């Protein structure tokens, strides 16, 4: 029996029949949109060979559906965002919303147990019904709980097995590196190579400790690096694996396309490991040096194809005066095969140490703290975290041009007097020329 689905194009919505138990793709007859589908198993199973067995299985499925509708499971999360002043799990006082996505939302909150400001991650409704997302949430909690490093956000507490679920980690009043770099591009500012190397060396040290504990991040990118003053911190271990190659099914792609290693793009789960994080860190170093990632593309599939097939360009193509030795280390981090990369992130940090800045670079300087919140966030804290101008300013890595000198009162008066004299002299000249013409 075929399965009837609706075209995912909102402007079309045409009903389409697809074969049960098969996978493939087809074009919608109405709008020509290409639709990919996976095999849908027969609901009655392979044992229902007779018409009577089929009817009995269908009847049982109908009863199960009716029972589920009669006794629906309460939603695991609130249907609306939490407001400042509300509490979660009878413990956390919500300050403000920091951000969110398809997985859930992150809030700044006060932990009443420890009397500490925390970043509170709360999964969305759909997570409760998806074992894969629950496992991802649990992996992040397990990964953070084993790590203690100045460049990794500290783990506080979590609840994974029952509602209300949460993960509480150290709150960093900074900005993610992605938004900082976006602002730098907009203002045409960039950091010098030695400061870029300092950032990467700090992250390499954090990854080295994580790898020594059997934790692989698997999704390193600028959005998962927080900057505060002269310190950077690694966050979001949501795709982390705890030393278990079977944690990822063969053929599954983990990570963000621009920063994915070739083995991640190819879905080779048995090859994903510490060297995959090193590749992502190499892409980040390339971007900090060259203002762009090694590969660009209009779609994610185009970028993945370039990662697998094209040769990595040297950073000196975009920064001709870059130290050749630094460019060589960057290219080694970006080798196609994991075995061709550096042995560990610890060795990487030692290789990059001679190129780093003698002073710790300041990426982001927050504005002075406001008085402590008492339950309802101030108006400026309720704004989105992406509005950089309202939250702080660039640090010493992105120096602003010096302000134009303010002219003194005497300088202004001299300029006005000089302008008046020139106008007066010009008027006399025109009068003399007019007399000559009349004469």
Image (cartoon, rainbow, N blue to C red):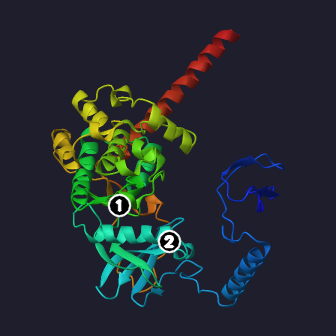
Identify the residue at horizontal 41%, vertical 29% (top origin).
Answer: 311
Q: Residue 158, relative to residue 315: is it above or below?
A: below
Residue 429 x %, y %: 56, 19
Task: Decide which of 326, 431 is in the foreground and name it.
Answer: 326
Q: Secondary structure at mark 1?
A: strand
Viewer-nearest residue: 126 or 313: 126
Q: Which quarter shows the N terminus? A: bottom right
Question: In the figure, residue 17 lies in which quadrant?
Answer: bottom right
**Residue receiving disc 2:** 131
Q: Is residue 363 visible?
A: yes
Q: Is residue 210 above or below residue 96?
A: above
Give the residue at x 32% y 59%. 234
Labels 1 & 2 near each other (Cβ < 8 A)? no
Q: Position of residue 379 (x, y in %)?
A: 49, 75
Disc 1 to disc 2, C-alpha distance = 16 Å
Q: Residue at x 34, y 88 (%)?
A: 112
Q: Residue furthest front?
A: 50
Q: Quadrant of the C terminus?
A: top right
Q: Give the vertical position of 46 relative to 278 (above or below).
A: below
x and y, in percent, of residue 437 in the image: 68, 10
Crowd around label 2: few <14 · some 14–19 · many ≥20 (10 Å): few
| Residue corresponding to mark 1 | 241
Q: Position of residue 407 (x, y in %)?
A: 37, 44
Name the secondary structure under disc 2.
helix
Above-or-below relation of 287 to 225: above
* Residue 349 relative to residue 244: left or right: left
Comparing 298 with 367, the one in front is 298
Q: Is residue 187 visible?
A: no
- Apparent side of residue 281 relative to residue 44 in the rendered image (left or right): left
Tally the numbered discs. Answer: 2
Front-most of residues 315 and 86: 315
Determine the image quadrant of residue 348: top left
């Amino acid at each position: 029996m075929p399965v009837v689905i609706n075209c995912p194009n909102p402007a079309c919505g045409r009903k389409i029949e697809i074969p049960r138990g098969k996978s493939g793709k087809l074009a919608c007859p109405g709008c020509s949109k290409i639709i990919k589908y996976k095999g849908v198993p027969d609901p009655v199973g392979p044992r229902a060979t007779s018409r009577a067995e089929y009817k009995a299985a269908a009847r049982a499925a109908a009863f199960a559906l009716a029972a589920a509708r009669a006794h629906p499971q309460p939603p695991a999360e609130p249907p609306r965002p939490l407001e400042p002043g509300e509490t979660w799990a009878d413990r956390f006082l919500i300050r403000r919303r920091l951000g969110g996505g398809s997985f859930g939302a992150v809030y700044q909150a006060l932990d009443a147990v420890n009397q500490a400001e925390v970043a509170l991650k709360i999964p969305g409704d759909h997570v409760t019904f998806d074992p894969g997302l629950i496992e991802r949430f649990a992996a992040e909690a397990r990964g953070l709980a084993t790590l203690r490093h100045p460049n990794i956000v500290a783990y506080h507490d979590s609840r994974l097995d029952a509602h209300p679920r949460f993960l509480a980690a150290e709150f960093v009043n900074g900005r993610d590196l992605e938004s900082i770099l976006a602002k730098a591009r907009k203002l045409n500012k960039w950091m010098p190579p030695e400061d870029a190397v300092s950032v990467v060396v700090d992250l390499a040290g954090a990854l080295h400790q994580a790898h020594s504990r059997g934790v692989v991040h698997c999704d390193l990118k600028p959005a998962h690096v927080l900057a505060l003053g002269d310190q950077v911190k690694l966050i979001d271990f949501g795709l982390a694996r705890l030393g278990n190659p079977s944690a990822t099914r063969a053929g599954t792609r983990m990570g963000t396309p621009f920063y994915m290693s070739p083995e991640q793009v190819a879905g080779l789960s048995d090859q994903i490991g510490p060297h995959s994080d090193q590749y992502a860190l190499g892409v980040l170093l390339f971007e900090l040096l060259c203002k762009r990632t090694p590969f660009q593309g209009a779609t994610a599939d185009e970028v993945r194809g370039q990662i697998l097939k094209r040769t990595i360009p040297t950073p000196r193509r975009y920064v001709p005066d870059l130290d050749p030795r630094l460019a060589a280390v960057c290219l080694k981090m970006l080798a196609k095969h994991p075995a061709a990369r550096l042995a560990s992130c610890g060795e990487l940090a030692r290789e990059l140490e001679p190129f780093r800045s003698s002073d710790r670079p300041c990426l982001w300087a927050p504005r002075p703290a406001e008085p402590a919140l008492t339950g309802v966030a101030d108006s400026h804290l309720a704004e989105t975290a992406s509005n950089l101008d309202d939250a702080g300013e660039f640090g010493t890595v992105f120096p602003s041009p010096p302000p134009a000198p303010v002219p003194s009162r005497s300088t202004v008066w001299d300029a006005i007097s000089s302008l008046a004299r020139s106008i007066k002299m010009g008027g006399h000249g025109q009068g003399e020329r007019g007399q000559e013409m009349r004469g």
